[in-house]
Image (tube, helix red, strand yellow):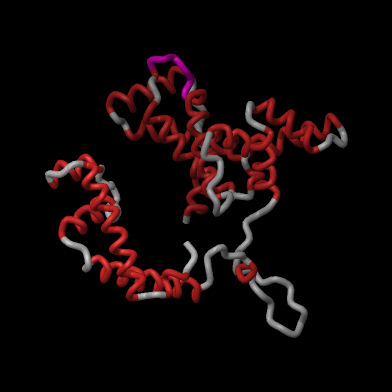
Amino acid sequence: MRESAGRTLAKMAMNAPYLAREEERALAVRWKERQDQQALHRMIMAHMRLVIAIAGRFRNFGLSMSDLIQEGHVGLLEAAARFDPEREVRFSTYATWWIRASMQDYILRNWSIVRGGTSSAQKALFFNLRRLRARLQRTGGATPTQEVYREVAQALHVSEADVALMDARLAGADTSLNAPLKSDGNDPASERIEFLVCDDPPPDEVAGESIDQERRAQWLHQALETLNWRELTILRERRLSEEGATLEALGTTLGISKERVRQIETRAMEKLRVALVKRHPDIAARPG
């Protein structure tokens, strides 16, 4: 449906008459001041040839011309909505920027599954790298790749690393992870996804670690039951909370000195250690 709309716009553009400067300005004033839809339609159709011409410049990015024309039409409408006829500028001059920007945004969104060209420098690289590289290689013969990168970087005011990265991205198309690899004829072909390396630990290690954490949490809960109220309060505020209360703050809350808080904390930690070793002697033999 989108492609059909693009073709329809292209056909209508061929039959639309050109606008003289004064006629164009009168239509723009009618649209801006009275929201005259007929005036807008005449302005848009008279400039669809411009949209088609700009779309032709982007035909080498592998996208449908009809889709590009449709996107350019959107940019043309945006230009009409923002155009100020009082500035004495031809509408085509103003609209060209919006048409090109709309098409470029469409290309960046649809050229690859992975979004690229999010910064102005990356956009400049995406749309100019191939052209500049081809021109340099035509004029310089067998120019080394690094020298081409350097000259492109200087021309577009970006780093050589950005040029190399964009060149690598443009060199290869998207490939499905479920695409089959070559088979030896006996076994079914494997898919690319089967050869991806996962840095996560194996499921058995994850399950074992989860069980160990639950067991340690239970041991700690049992050991904490050996502490009195003040020891438990100090340990919870000092060691078991994210904030970690200071000795001074706890001393003020409990009505004791910060040195006394430190002594109680040390004694509580020792009681915890003794309780854990008593119930689980193998803890003492573990490193760390």
Q: Most extreme residue toward the bottom, as rendered?
A: 186
**Residue placed most toward the observer, 140 or 145:** 145
Q: Position of residue 245 (x, y in %)?
A: 25, 45
Q: Position of residue 16 (x, y in %)?
A: 50, 35
Residue 285 is inside the magenta segment: no
Nearest to the observer: residue 156 or residue 87: 156
Relative horizontal placement of residue 137, taking residue 206 as reference (left or right): right
Query: Which image quadrant for residue 31?
Result: top left
Range drawn in magenta: 86-91
Q: Is residue 34 visible?
A: yes
Q: Residue at horizontal 49%, vertical 38%?
A: 102
Q: Residue furthest left?
A: 255
Answer with left or right where residue 129 lies relative to residue 225.
right
| Residue located at (44% from left, 23% from top) | 24
Q: Quadrant of residue 140?
A: top right
Where 238 sits versus 30, above or below? below
Residue sitting at the far right: 141
**Considering depth in this image, is 19 or 286 the residue closer to the camera?**
286
Visible residue check, residue 7: no
Q: Nearer the viewer, residue 202 or 167?
A: 202
**Residue sitting at x 43%, y 69%:** 284
Q: x and y percent of residue 9 in the render? A: 50, 44
Q: Position of residue 138 (x, y in %)?
A: 83, 33
**Residue drawn at 65 percent across, 28 percent down:** 156
